[in-house]
Image (cartoon, rainbow, N blue to C red):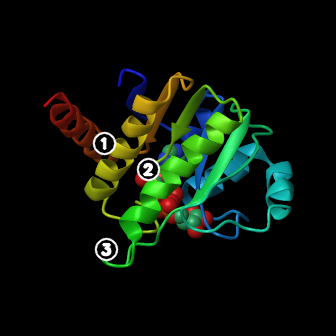
Amino acid sequence: MQRFSIIKGNIVKAKTDAIVNAANTSLLGGGGVDGAIHRVAGEELLEECKSLGGCKRGEAKITKGYNLKANYVIHTPGPIWRGGKFGEDELLENCYKNSLRLAKENGVKTIAFPSISTGVYCFPVDRAAKIAVKAICSFLQTDSALEQVIMICFDEETKEAYVNAFEEYKRKDAM
Ligand code: APR
């Protein structure tokens, strides 16, 4: 569990091997963290994304990082919140699991995530944090190759949600 940490910051500044992009299914950029990553990475990122033919929600695709500090960007379109009865929880869990799987397949040792789907896609942040923390910590319990996973929260409210979710997870795990 000590390989997982939660900080407040801007994911485009992360020095990890990979950063995860809360993308949309076109993979052709957008606002929020997607817009920030494309702005810093530059045009070449968009060019590579155009060759990928989009990405289904809950799945993930990897590209180079170009002008970012990170060597890779893992793009994963999260679920759009529609009230919770349309498989949103499972899709969100798959975003984390598939991003971590792809990172491992590409020899990534350190990776940073944003809070997927809790912005434009309106997924409730406390609920999303529980799903994300469980998916990340469960992966780390079965994998020793990944050295560091960082959740980079853009604001205090989001950070608090993830810190609370992580504390709750550690309490349950200790039982
Ligand atoms: N670094 C870290 N986190 C960020 C950054 C940043 N530079 N910018 C935004 N965030 C945070 C938001 O505050 C929110 O907590 O990322 C989280 C996810 O918000 P969005 O970026 O809106 O992503 P999402 O809710 O998954 O919606 C994806 O928005 O930008 C479009 O193209 C994207 O259509 C897709 C949709």
Q: Who comes first in sequence, dot 3 or dot 2?
A: 3
Residue type indicated by callout 3: Gly
Q: Secondary structure at mark 3?
A: loop
If you read the primary sequence from the N terminus, does the residue marked by circle 1 or circle 3 appear first?
A: 3
- Residue 25 image offset from top left, x and y in percent: 64, 69
View extreme (left): residue: 175
Q: Which mark is residue 82?
A: none
Secondary structure type for disc 1: helix
Verify CB contact (< 8 Å) between mark 1 and mark 2: yes
Image point 61% across, 40% down: which residue?
19
Q: Which residue position holds label 1?
A: 162
Residue sitting nearer the eye, 44 or 71: 71
Residue in the foreground of this view, choosing between 128 and 58: 58
Rounded to the nearest angstrom, the CA distance separating label 3 from label 2 is 17 Å
Residue shown at the point (72%, 38%) measured from the top left = 72
Residue holding disc 3: 84
The residue that mark 2 highlights is: 115
Quarter of the view holding residue 67: top right
Q: Amino acid at mark 2?
A: Ser
